[in-house]
Image: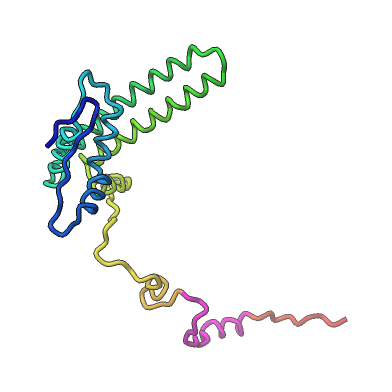
Amino acid sequence: MKKPKKGESVFQIYCQPDETEEQSLARTMISPALQSAATINEYVNSPVELDLQAIIDCLDEPVGQVKNGNLDCIEQMLLVQACTLDVIANNLFRRAKVQEYLKHSETFMKIGLRAQSQSRANLEALIGMKKPRAELIKQTNIAHGHQQVNNFPEKENPPNELMEKTDGERLDTGAPQEAVRVDSDLATVEEIHRAKNKKRQS
């Protein structure tokens, strides 16, 4: 491999057996590792020139860890980002305090609040990784009196099952029902206790 000149970025391209050179180049150029490495190389404040392939290799290491189920690198990144964003937010809040014009002060406050909100989102994501969401839902759905709400019923009722029958009776009042015979006792009471005095005729 030819030694790169100062300021040049060099990376390796691995050709797959069923790929052409053009396809291998396109796959490599749009790969997340290369794109991220190029961005890091532009933004990082390094006293020495960084090798692009070295950055790609550093990015490939945590990717391999995640594939194997090790999420330590993600937890570290979320926590570090949350701390960084919190520092940025507080710096913007202090700068907003010393602004002469209200418009400038509001701008710094808005950006600071966005950074603070993103910091909180990172922490919530980190907590979600340490404590699965299903467990959080199970704990928050405990009613008063230590009565637990079942979020995962073994068998869900069909949509109209509850409106069908209850103890042998239909809840749908519009559905046809059997005729009910007249209570003979009530009929007798009506005959016995009818008014004895007939209406006076004028």
Q: Quadrant of residue 127?
A: top left
Q: Give the left or right position of residue 158, taking residue 107 as reference.
A: left
Q: Nearer the viewer, residue 94 or 135?
A: 94
Residue at 29%, 33% in the rendered image:
39
Is the C terminus in the top left, top right, bottom left or bottom right quadrant?
bottom right
Place of residue 78 in the rendered image (x, y in percent of width and height, measured from the top left): 25, 33
Is the N terminus in the top left, top right, bottom left or bottom right quadrant?
top left
Residue stretch rendered in magenta on the structure: 172-193
Q: Farthest front residue? A: 2
Q: Give the left or right position of residue 180, taking residue 61 as reference.
A: right
Residue at 78%, 81% in the rendered image:
199
Q: Give the left or right position of residue 79, taking residue 101 as reference.
A: left
Place of residue 194 in the rendered image (x, y in percent of width and height, measured from the top left): 65, 81
Place of residue 7 in the rendered image (x, y in percent of width and height, measured from the top left): 24, 26
Q: Give the left or right position of residue 14, taking residue 157 as reference.
A: left
Q: Nearer the viewer, residue 135 or 143?
A: 135
Q: Nearer the viewer, residue 126 or 81?
A: 81
Residue 117's place in the image compared with 177, above or below, is: above
Residue 127's place in the image compared with 23, above or below, is: above
Q: Specify how the rendered protein is coloured.
A: rainbow
Q: Is residue 179 magenta?
A: yes
Q: Is residue 23 magenta?
A: no
